[in-house]
Amino acid sequence: MIKKMTAMTLLGFACISAARAGDLALSVELPRIDVAEYHRPYVAMWVQNSDSGDVTNLVVWYQLDKSDEKGEQWLKDMRQWWRRSGRGLDMPVDGITGATQQPGVHTVDTKNLKNLAAGSYKLYVEAAREVGGRELLQIPFEWPAKSSQLLEVQGKTELGKIALQLTP
């Protein structure tokens, strides 16, 4: 469920970097999962225009250290991202791709959204983990923001709290 948060929650959510005027700030939590065989999840984040369907990739975290590029073969496990954008990319992509991340809260660079046109959008965050599950979360938003907002959604398995802070 997506909620608009109070000023008290905004103060308590220190992991989001301070947003500048006309900006978006994004944080993503990867939960610590207590299982015998834990593998870091592959995670893709993108913004999709609700009208045109245009996709702007923010980040793709996957296993980069394989010299034989075997890490790329599992990218298609993030099914929605793969269908909308991933299969058309030549990986790795400068400024977008990075290594898998440890459990914790991560601030995501939103510089790819600097020239976002006015309109209705959805932020998508998708995760897939070997010997684990998959999860896809979304946050709809309007850009440019008319007021400061903190939009959050809570994952159930592979993702924790996703928070998008909008500043007019």
Image: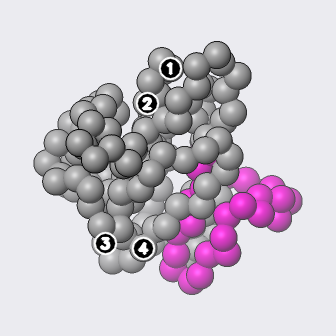
- Label 2 or label 3, whichever lies nearer to me, is 2
Q: Gap in Å between the C-alphas at discs 2 and 3?
A: 30 Å
Q: Earlier in the sequence, mark 2 or mark 3?
A: 3
Whether pointer 4 and pointer 2 mark residues with C-beta atoms closer than 8 Å, the reply is no
- Give the quadrant of the C terminus: bottom right
Q: Is residue 20 left or right of residue 124?
A: right
Single out the mark in the foreground, 1 or 3: 1
Image location of residue 164, percent across then percent down: 57, 57
Q: Are marks 3 and 4 in contact (CB under 8 Å)?
A: no
Task: Please indicate whether residue 136 sits to the left or right of residue 10 in the image.
Answer: left
Other-residue count near label 3 (Cα within 10 Å), few / some / many at <14 / 14–19 / ≥20: few
Taking the image as drawn, is residue 1 in sight?
A: no
| Pointer 1 with pointer 2, Cβ within 8 A | yes
Query: How is this picture coloured?
Result: one colour
Residue for badge 2: 128
Mark 1 Cα shell of 10 Å, populated few (<14), some (14-19), many (≥20): some
Q: Secondary structure at mark 4?
A: helix
Residue under label 4? 111
In the rendering, which numbered label is found on residue 132?
Answer: 1
Q: CA distance from mark 1 to mark 3?
A: 37 Å
Measured Cα–Cα span from mark 3 to mark 4: 14 Å
Work out whether mark 1 precedes mark 3 in sequence or the reverse, and give the earlier one.
3
Boundaries of the magenta span: 1-29
Q: Is residue 136 above or below residue 157?
A: below
